[in-house]
Image (tube, rainbow, N blue to C red):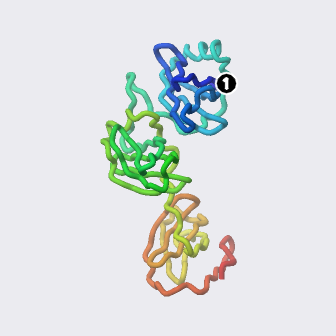
Amino acid sequence: MEFEIRVPPSGEATLLPGRQRISVPRVSPPRGLAGRTLTVWADLRSLHVLLDGHLVRTIVSRLLPHDLAYLVMRYGARPAGPAPAAAALRRINGNTELAAGEAIEIDRMVQRDGHVTIAGIKCQIAFALARRTVTIRLDGHLMHAIADNAPVGTWPCPITADRDARLPGARTAASPLPPPPLPAGSIRVQRRLHASGRFMANKQFIKLGPRHAGKLVTVVIEGTHYRVLHGEEELAIRPRRDTTPVTRLYVRGKGTQPDGR
């Protein structure tokens, strides 16, 4: 279901007395979002809160099937389209559960000294991101900070996997970790993989395996290695045998990039 609510001065809205509340993050100016109208997308697993079409937060739903009728009566809830974000974590016997190896994401605002707080633990991210909201990805062993759809840092995970599921605003990771930004001045070419799963770049054969046959990949030629990307996914990193400067790129064959010489 989908419906609108108005944020009270406290910043905490009660959807269903005794069962479901939404705490809205306090942002600048000091009064935060008080008085603003938010759109809530709700099902039996997740609540997604949006402001002017932008996701504010995702929380675990505590609603039961018969509660949806209550939302229709109180808020004029209507049938909703697809979920605007990844689902919140699953609840089993009233407790949030995280599947083995499952990564989660949370959104946190970077404080003016460059840190975010996760489960009461200060984690230094970057001074340059102060006052910005970043996505923190936790996979049980590592913590990644993501801004503008690019990773800005990776550190050991500050909390254990069993505590990940209890973090406020935790949701399942909807996509793979984005690749790091490309270095300035790097050379990029495209190659179509042969049926054997290999291709040639800069007179060097690179093999990825038959499962990648036919894919059109982007090859980033850096100082000492090649990075092979398929869309946003990084498929492989291979060392360069010839590290002399690249002065000419030429490709023959249908379905490959003809220019960039």
Residue 137 lies, in percent from the top left, at: 44, 47
Sort mark 1 into few (<14), some (14-19) or many (20+) by Cα contacts within 10 Å: few
- Residue 50 versus residue 220 in the image, above or below: above
- Secondary structure beneath disc 1? loop
Q: In the displayed structure, does residue 191 sit left or right of residue 226?
A: right
Residue type, label 1: Pro
- Residue 95 versus residue 224 in the image, above or below: above
Which residue has dot 1 on it?
Answer: 79
Which one is in front, 256 or 90? Answer: 90
- Which quarter of the rendering shows the C terminus? bottom right
Q: In the displayed structure, does residue 255 sit left or right of residue 122?
A: right
Q: Quadrant of residue 258?
A: bottom right
Give the residue displayed 41% in from the left and 43% down from the top. Answer: 102
Residue 242 lies, in percent from the top left, at: 46, 85
Give the residue displayed 58% in from the left and 27% down from the top. Answer: 34
Residue 50 lies, in percent from the top left, at: 61, 34
